[in-house]
Amino acid sequence: QLSERLQVVASYVEQDAILADIGSDHAYLPTYLVQKGVIKKAVAGEVVKGPYESALKNVQREDVSDAVTVRLANGLFAIQEQDGVDTVSIAGMGGPLIAKILDEGNSHLTSVKRIITQPNIHAKAIREWAVNNDWVIIDERILKEDGKIYEVVVLEKGKASYSEADLLLGPILSIEKNHVFNEKWLHEIDQWNHIVHSLGEAKNNPIAEEKRGQLNKQIQLVEEVLQK
Ligand code: SAM
């Protein structure tokens, strides 16, 4: 049984898609999607030998080796032209690492129509990458599982611009404002206030002053969205 987090990612993979799951670890996601009959084939990419071997083992055990090709490769370099990949998923990493993977392997995205990302932290890095590389956010989700909060950001080709608040909080999540979203950002505000308070004790320090100013601006930005 797939975690709720990966089930949300899976729900954005369209019927008959050809998927590349990057940083696949045990290849749970592509294996599940093949077994459910959602996809016919997938590439499971892993850059680290241990997880790569786990993926190979799991794919064999679940008898989906014909459908899931496991490759030891860095990021999107796991995708080969003849695969015809149209959907990419990158889940369970920090936003900056996901953005770096997308940036470095951009030339491997030519046939890709949809990118499903699941950043554990700093989803902003992915939204910024999207704007700078002509992808738009078509949907977003936020969920809590086992005490941890996760975001899912789904991209398709297109041009868009987002406000500073939308880049930070997510344009769709900010409209929806569900209870997990409120919990996450109230917690962030709490932490920032803590830092602002301790920076306030460093008197006549221009660097601390600047940082305090930035944090206060950020707090105001988020509070405005929460109060809207
Ligand atoms: N995607 C799975 C999930 O969401 O449950 C596994 C997440 S696991 C925490 C992150 C995986 O990404 C690790 O197995 C790691 O080896 C892999 N990884 C990190 N950087 C990568 C890269 N540049 N290319 C491919 N895999 C990478």
Image (cartoon, rainbow, N blue to C red):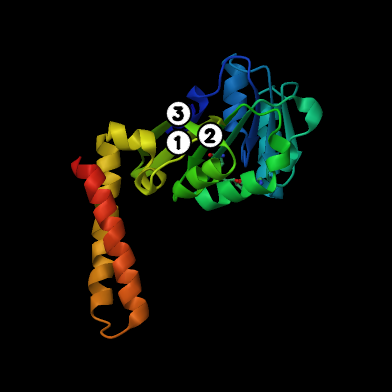
The answer to the question of whether label 3 and label 1 lie on touching residues, with beta carbons closer than 8 A, is: yes
Which residue in the structure is indicated by mark 3?
8
N-term mark: 2 or 3:
3
Ligand 1 is found in which quarter of the picture?
top right
Q: Which sits in the foreground, 122 or 57?
A: 122
Residue at the image position 33 percent from the left and 44 percent from the top = 147
Q: Nearer the viewer, mark 2 or mark 1?
A: 2
Specify whether 162 is left or right of 158: left
N-term mark: 3 or 1:
3
N-term mark: 2 or 1:
1
Quadrant assignment for the C terminus? top left
The answer to the question of whether label 2 and label 1 lie on touching residues, with beta carbons closer than 8 A, is: no
Q: Which sits in the foreground, 78 or 63?
A: 78
User: Is the residue marked 3 within 8 Å of ligand 1, measured from its CB?
Assistant: no
Q: Using the rendered view, name the quadrant where residue 188 is placed.
A: bottom left
Residue at the image position 28 percent from the left and 48 percent from the top = 185
Give the amino acid type for the residue marked by disc 1 in the picture.
Val
Query: How far apart in space, not on screen, are marks 2 and 3 (Cα)?
Result: 25 Å
* Element type where label 1 sits in the image: strand
* Element type where label 2 sits in the image: loop
Residue at the image position 49 percent from the left and 30 percent from the top = 9
Q: Which sits in the foreground, 80 or 32?
A: 80
Res 53 visible: no
Which residue in the structure is indicated by mark 1?
152
Res 96 visible: yes
Give the amino acid type for the residue marked by disc 2 in the picture.
Lys
